[in-house]
Image: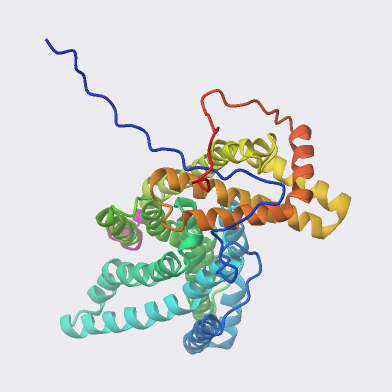
């Protein structure tokens, strides 16, 4: 009788780590290459032209949006709506940026996402929703039914598709900055916050105009009711919808390149889920006078809590990835033994920046901050290599990051060592990992 039993598949080999010399060479990095991770990059003429084209189109969309809103609300209504709609924006953006602290994405991506949501997506939604609703009203001769269909069917499809376009553009054209679920959540959150900002201007400005026309004032006014529902109770509604799309793109980002079907289906599933929740939210009035509150309590609040937990859990998972992947580079001599643990603690990172700033000034604090960002990117790059999603340029990208670490090591390493001691991050060699002999640059 055979004693054979199924064996688990062998684990993927660890990517080799180059050994650090006193004056290391970075042969895989071209002299005039594209330095993806350089903090300040000079635009080439083609990239500058594309950037200015995007800025111009978004600015024109913003001007058209302002004109349309002013036409519907009047100048006074526009200013009141603008002031009230602005209130939740800093809080929402700060919350999404807080989630992105482990490996902060470039501000230019987030500014683009917010501007796209506030200008381009909002303009597409206003035009498409109005056209579709008018067409349905004409075809059915039932304006009330057209408004209901427009709100529950047309608006979720149009608006979520328009917002998803920003996530798709960053996913395709800024792929090196889009590495996982947190990036998807943050980009989608910034896009949806911009969209909600513009939409709230329109709703609040229109409510103010109605109050002016009929003489309403105080807590019984339409403006107060609209402010309570849209700004106090549900400022997270649009971000919650679009974050579903962002999670879909984030899951696609961590899926192996060979799984093309999965990488295509996941964003579409996220978009479909965003449309579904959006439609349920818009159609809550169908369930009667208490339908809005029923959907709010039964769906929106639990979904918001679940997504908040998921985002925070994933952020902690990112810190664990840093702690797991960087010891290989410490063993090879690129980092000191205490740095992986210091870099996997947000508190220790802050202490290191503050220490460098107090000792050597703002330039040193900035160098430590950049060092932390490069080391985090290096850990994620190595983690993606283990999963088979790093891409064929893994060696060149690894060397780019090691080069930037080496440039800042004399300032950042002592600061991180002090932070490790100050925060009680005591180093011990991992007993289950062997980093000996990693050197892909030997014959």
Where residue 281 sits, quadrant-wise, is: bottom left
Judged from this view, the residue extending furthest toward the right is 359
Q: Residue at x 47, y 43 (%)?
A: 15
Which colour scheme appears in the figure?
Answer: rainbow
123 left or right of 19? Answer: left
Is residue 101 covered in magenta? Answer: no
Q: Nearer the viewer, residue 354 or 58?
A: 354
**Magenta part of the chain:** 281-292
* One can see residue 233 in this view: no
Secondary structure that dominates the magenta span: helix
Vertical relation: 417 (above or below) 169: above
Please state the horizontal and vertical placement of residue 193, each as a whole percent of the image.
51, 65
Q: Position of residue 341 (x, y in %)?
A: 65, 35
Foreground residue among 78 and 306 = 306
Direction front: furthest residue: 443
Q: Is residue 177 visible?
A: yes
Q: Residue at x 58, y 52 (%)?
A: 103
Using the image, determine if residue 35 lies above or below residue 412.
below
Q: Does the stretch in magenta take in 284?
A: yes
């Amino acid at each position: 009788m055979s004693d054979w039993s199924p064996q688990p598949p062998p684990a993927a080999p660890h990517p080799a780590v180059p050994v650090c010399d006193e004056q290391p060479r970075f042969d895989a990095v071209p002299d005039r290459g594209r330095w993806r991770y350089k903090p300040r990059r000079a635009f080439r003429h083609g990239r500058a032209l594309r950037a200015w084209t995007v800025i111009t189109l978004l600015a024109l969309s913003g001007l058209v949006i302002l004109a349309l809103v002013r036409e519907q609300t009047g100048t006074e209504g526009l200013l009141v709506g603008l002031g009230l709609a602005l209130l939740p924006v800093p809080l929402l953006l700060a919350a999404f940026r807080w989630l992105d602290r482990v490996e902060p994405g470039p501000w230019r991506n987030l500014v683009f996402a917010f501007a796209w949501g506030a200008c381009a997506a909002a303009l597409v939604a206003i035009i498409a929703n109005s056209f579709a609703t008018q067409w349905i009203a004409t075809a059915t001769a039932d304006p009330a039914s057209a408004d209901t269909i427009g709100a529950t069917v047309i608006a979720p499809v149009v608006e979520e598709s328009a917002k998803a376009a920003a996530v798709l553009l960053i996913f395709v054209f800024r792929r090196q900055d889009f590495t996982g679920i947190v990036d998807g959540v943050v980009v989608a959150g910034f896009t949806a916050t911009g969209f909600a900002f513009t939409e709230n201007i329109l709703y609040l400005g229109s409510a103010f105009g109605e109050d002016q026309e009929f003489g309403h004032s105080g807590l019984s006014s339409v403006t107060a009711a609209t402010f309570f529902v849209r700004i106090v109770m549900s400022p997270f509604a649009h971000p919650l919808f679009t974050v579903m799309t962002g999670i879909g793109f984030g899951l696609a980002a961590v899926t192996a390149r060979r799984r093309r079907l999965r990488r295509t289906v996941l964003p579409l599933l996220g978009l479909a889920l965003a449309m579904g929740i959006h439609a349920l939210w818009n159609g809550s009035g169908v369930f009667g006078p208490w339908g809005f509150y029923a959907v709010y309590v039964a769906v929106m609040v639990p979904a918001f809590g679940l997504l908040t937990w998921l985002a925070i859990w994933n952020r902690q998972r990112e810190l664990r990835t840093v702690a797991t992947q960087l010891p290989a580079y410490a063993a090879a001599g690129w980092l000191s033994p205490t740095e992986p643990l210091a870099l996997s603690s947000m508190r220790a990172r802050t202490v290191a920046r503050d220490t460098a700033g107090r000792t050597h000034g703002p330039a040193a604090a900035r160098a430590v901050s950049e060092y932390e960002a490069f080391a985090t990117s290096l850990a994620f790059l190595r983690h993606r290599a283990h999963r088979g999603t790093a891409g064929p340029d893994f060696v060149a990208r690894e060397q780019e990051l090691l080069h930037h670490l080496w440039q800042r090591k004399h300032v950042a390493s002592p600061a991180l060592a002090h932070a490790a001691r100050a925060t009680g991050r005591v180093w011990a060699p991992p007993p289950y990992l062997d980093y000996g002999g990693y050197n892909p640059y030997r014959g």
